[in-house]
Image: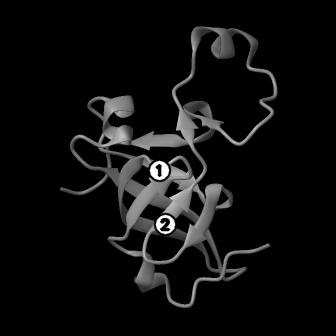
Amino acid sequence: MAIQVSSVSDTYAKDVFTDKGFFCGKVEDIECDLKRFKVRSLVIRAMKGSYLSKMLGDKKGVVIPFPMVQAIGDVILIKHIVPPTVEEEATSGSRGGRETSMDDVSTTNAVDD
């Protein structure tokens, strides 16, 4: 089922959590496909002390593909992200399950302060 967004501006600065309840940060920007009138991805700023900031280290944020978004309401829920392990990096095979590796998302330092 597709997620309906009534207004793109409603998603800015919303809190983002994984489906396991970990706080990731806030929506900083949105990438849209103007030809298809669809949201492509969300840029999430990693807040200090958040699950995402601990994973990213000195990076400021991450670009989450919109298919990873599970719900938009008072907060935004995304699929759980796990850091890649040495075993996953070596095999890089298919992952069954709901968790998504950091290999599937893009990190960014381009988030404005």
Outermost residue toward the left in this view: 113
Where residue 50 appears, as percent x and y from the top left, is 30, 43
**Side of 63 relative to 89 (left or right):** left
Q: Amino acid at mark 2?
A: Ile
Q: Position of residue 85 (x, y in %)?
A: 57, 15
Could you tell me which quadrant the N terminus lies in?
Answer: bottom right
Q: CA distance from mark 1 to mark 2?
A: 11 Å
Q: Position of residue 37 (x, y in %)?
A: 67, 83
Residue at 53%, 46% (x, y): give it: 20
Image point (49%, 66%), residue name: 76
- Does 40 sit left or right of 21 as displayed? right
Above or below, comparing residue 27 to residue 53 in the picture: below
13, 113: nearer the viewer: 13
Instruction: Looking at the image, tell me whether mark 1 or mark 2 is earlier in sequence order.
Output: 1
Q: Nearer the viewer, residue 111 or 16?
A: 16
Label 1 SS? loop
How many residues crowd mark 2 within 10 Å: few (<14), some (14–19), many (20+)?
some
Scheme of image coloration: one colour
Query: Which of the 4 image quarters holds residue 100?
Result: top right
Q: Secondary structure at mark 2?
A: strand
Q: Give the quarter of the figure containing the C terminus.
A: bottom left
Residue sitting nearer the eye, 36 or 74: 74
Residue 108, given in percent of the width and then of the height, sits at 39, 43
Residue marked by disc 1: 21
- The residue at which mark 2 appears reads as 76
Say above or below: 111 vs 13. above
